[in-house]
Structures are given as C-alpha cells and as structure tokens.
Amino acid sequence: MFSKRLADCVALTDAELYGKIKGLGDEPLHQAMLYACTGGKRLRAFLVMESAALFGIPDHVSVKAAAAVEAMHAYSLVHDDLPAMDNDDLRRGQPTVHKKWDDATAILVGDAMQALAYDFLTDEALGAARLNLVAGMAQASGAHGMVLGQARDIEAETRQLDMDQVMQLQALKTGALITWSATAGAVIADQPTPMLKTYAAAVGLAFQIIDDILDIEAPEGLGKTPGKDAAQGKATFVSLMGLEGARKRAEALILLAKGAVASYGSKATALQEAAEFVLTRKS
C-alpha cells in the first residue's frame, strides 16, 4: 500500500513542482531550480498528502502543500551543500548545484525555492488554512526550526555535543519540516494534531538515526558523500550509542510512531508502512 501511494504522491507532487518552475521561464536560474528539486524520496510530500487523506482532503488540494515542503526542502539542501556550510560535492547521486553551476547560482536557487514554497501555500485551493500553513512553515523552516538546526550543526564541528544536544539539533534540522509535513493535513482539515505530532517526532528522529547509520555503512546508491560527520569529528547517534544501540533506538521509535496513529485504524496503514520504510531505507 505504501509503495503505491508513495508513487502516486511523487507523480502528483512532481507535476505540480516542475510545472510551476517551468512556468517561470527558461533562464539559467530556472534550469538550476529544476535540477535542484529533481530526485529524492518525496517522503515529506507523502506525509502531507497522506495526513490530509486521513481527514478526507482530496489530493488536488493537499498537493499544493506537498509541493511547498519539497521546494523548502530543496532550498535547504542546496544551501547546506555550499562550501561555507557542509561543503559537499554530491547530492542525490548528482553533482551539487554549486558544483554544476557556481556558488552564486546555488545561493539564488535556494532563495528562489524558499519563495516558491510560500507561493504554493498561498494557493486558493488550500482555503482558510493558508495562513496557518504559512505561519507553521515559517516556524518550522526558520530561526526557530530548520535554520537554527543548521546553525547548531555548524557549531558541532568545533565542539562536542552530548546526546540531548544532538537530539535537539536533529529535531530542529530534520524533524521540524517532517512534523510540519505530517500535521499539514490536520491543519488543512482544521483538526487536532497531537497524535500526528507524536508520529512525526518519532519518525523524524528515526530518520536521522538511520541517516547516521547509513553514513557509516555507506551502502551502494547512497547518493551522497559518506563519512563526512566522522571526518569532521561531529557527535552523531552512532558515535554516542554505537551501531547496534542506534539501530535499536530507531526500531523503538518506529514502534512508537506506528502506535501513535493506530487509533485512525486502516486509514493509517500507509503512514505506518512509511515508518517501516524509514527504518529499512538504504539511501
């Protein structure tokens, strides 16, 4: 069920995202924007659309918010890869934007993708939820969320963090946008979000733990440069808990996530399977 639903969400989100960017024109900036958002698992888009489906929100409405979070995520990756940040040459198995073009283009692409995210969230299809979605995205992606997490990640290159600090960093850098995604459907439907927040927090933390494991194990097809955190001396879940301890923690988090949405019954099957996917992914 998850695989089919994910494929459907990917197709709808890509059509929305690429269509909007192609409609901007064919300048080098627009070409680089298309390149920046090509590929990826689209897990955040899936979480938006599937959380919306729980409340009967149709895909042609929720896809606007799904495209928004993927645009915001693309911006974060482009800027994170820059030499002044994480200094990476590879993303999703391809040269990073600043390598294929240059630093200035990458900065402008990130700026444009961030603005595009808010453009999607002001679409009339989202109705009265638009203001709450925009406000939530601003909190999740800015100085209270993802960007603060990125800042702390840079600081981690020069000081050793303990477990609580690493958890807080990742809750901001990775978890904030995942939580926005998993609760967006409830926001659109004007429904309470506590169970979905619990689900998202567990999935987001497990996602990062598996990321740290993959960074060490470096499976074929990882799509990015492995071993960078260890080379920079950063504290990670693996360095703090060991491989086996990290894996067991991720497994416990996935059980927590699945239980958090169990009250939705069979409507939550795809969300529960998505949590299992986070645990078993190889890229």
Image (spheres, rainbow, N blue to C red):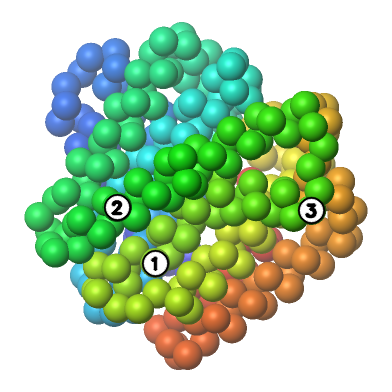
Q: Is residue 206 visible to us here?
A: yes
Asked if labels 1 and 2 touch by Cβ distance under 8 angstroms, the answer is no
Helix, strand or loop status at disc 2: helix
Q: Identify residue for label 2.
A: 135
Image-quadrant location for residue 44: bottom left
Spot occupied by residue 233 in the image (x, y as percentages of width and height): 83, 31
The kind of residue on which mark 2 rests is: Ala
Q: Is residue 179 left or right of residue 209?
A: left
Spot occupied by residue 77 in the image (x, y as percentages of width and height): 50, 33
Residue at 23 percent of width and 32 percent of height: 21
The kind of residue on which mark 3 rests is: Met
Q: CA distance from mark 3 to mark 1?
A: 26 Å
Image-quadrant location for residue 216: top right
Asked if labels 3 and 2 touch by Cβ distance under 8 angstroms, the answer is no
Helix, strand or loop status at disc 3: helix
Q: Identify residue for label 3.
A: 163
Residue at 58 percent of width and 17 percent of height: 84
Residue at 27 percent of width and 22 percent of height: 30
Q: CA distance from mark 2 to mark 1?
A: 13 Å
User: Circle 3: is it few (<14), some (14-19), or many (20+) Cα within 10 Å?
Assistant: some
- Residue 183, numbered circle: 1
Q: Nearer the viewer, residue 122 or 21?
A: 122
